[in-house]
Image (tube, rainbow, N blue to C red):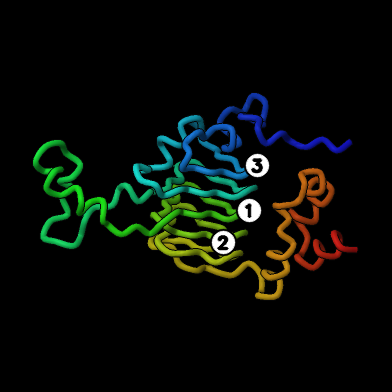
Amino acid sequence: MTVVPNPMTRHPLPGFDRVAFLKPVVSSPTIEVGEYTYYDDPAGPDDFERTNVLYAYGPERLVIGRYCAIAAGTRFLMAGGAHPTVGVSTFPFAMFEGAWRDATLDLAMGMPSRGDTVVGNDVWFGYGCLVMPGVRIGDGAIIAAGSVVTADVEPYTVVGGNPARLIRRRFDEDDVRRLLDLAWWDWPAEQVARHARSIMAGTPAELERAVRG
C-alpha cells in the first residue's frame, strides 16, 4: 500500500510547525484552497486568512489550486480595499456611519470589480509576493520573490519585479500543452506518488511516456 501525506493534516512535518497545508487552515467561505498547497512562515501559518488575505470584505473569492508552494509574506489583496476613482476624491466616505454613508453607499456598491483572484495548480510563490485583486495565475507558474503581480500570468512562465513581468517561459508551447493535458495535479495521490520522480525531475515527454506507456 502506497503511503502519502494526508492533505487534511494541519502541520504535515512533525516538529516543524511553520509549514501548514492550507486546506484545513482556512475557514472563510470566500477562500478555496486545493489539496497539498502549503504555506511556510516562521511566525506560524495559522493566521493566513487574516494576515495574508487582505480586504476580503466583498463577494470576490480567492481560489488557489493544488500543490502550490507559498513562501512567507505572500499576500493577496482583495477588491474590498479598492477606493473610488471616478470623482474628485478617493476618500471612502461610505465606510463611515451617518450622513457620509447615506449619501455615498450606492456609489461604493456600484464600483466595478475585477472579480475573483484565481491561482492555478503547482504555482510557486517566492518570499514576499503581492498579488493584486482579480489576477489569474496559470498552472505551473513561478512568481519571483518580492514580485507585485498586477496582471494575469500565463501557465508555466516565470515572472518577477514590480510590476511583475515575464522573465522566461519554462517550456515551449508544445510541452505546455502536454503538461496541461496531463494535469498531474488532478491524479489520485497514489498515482502522483508513483510518478513523483518524473514529475519532479523529468521532462514533459518523459512524464507523458511514464504515464501512458
Residue 32 in the image: x percent, y percent?
53, 44
Is 87 placed left or right of 119 in the picture?
left
Mark 2, residue position: 138
Upstream in the sequence, badge 3 or badge 2? 3
Position of 158 relative to 15 (above/below): below
Dot 2 falls on a residue whose secondary structure is loop
The residue at the point 60 percent across, 48 percent down is 68
Mark 1, residue position: 122
Is 21 placed left or right of 201 in the picture?
left
**CA gap, disc 1 to disc 3?**
10 Å
Residue 108 in the image: x percent, y percent?
23, 51
Dot 1 falls on a residue whose secondary structure is loop
Mark 3, residue position: 36
Nearest the eye: 152 or 84: 84
The kind of residue on which mark 3 rests is: Tyr
Which quarter of the image is occupied by the N terminus? top right
The residue at the point 67 percent across, 36 percent down is 7
User: Looking at the image, do the residues carrying marks 1 and 3 touch, with CB atoms under 8 Å apart?
Assistant: no
The kind of residue on which mark 1 rests is: Asp
Q: Residues within 10 Å of mark 2 (few under 14, many from 20)?
A: many
The residue at the point 70 percent across, 75 percent down is 174
Q: Residues within 10 Å of mark 1 (few under 14, many from 20)?
A: many
Dot 3 falls on a residue whose secondary structure is loop
Residue 142 in the image: x percent, y percent?
56, 58
* Residue furthest bottom as drawn: 173
Residue 96 in the image: x percent, y percent?
16, 39
Is 123 placed left or right of 185 in the picture?
left
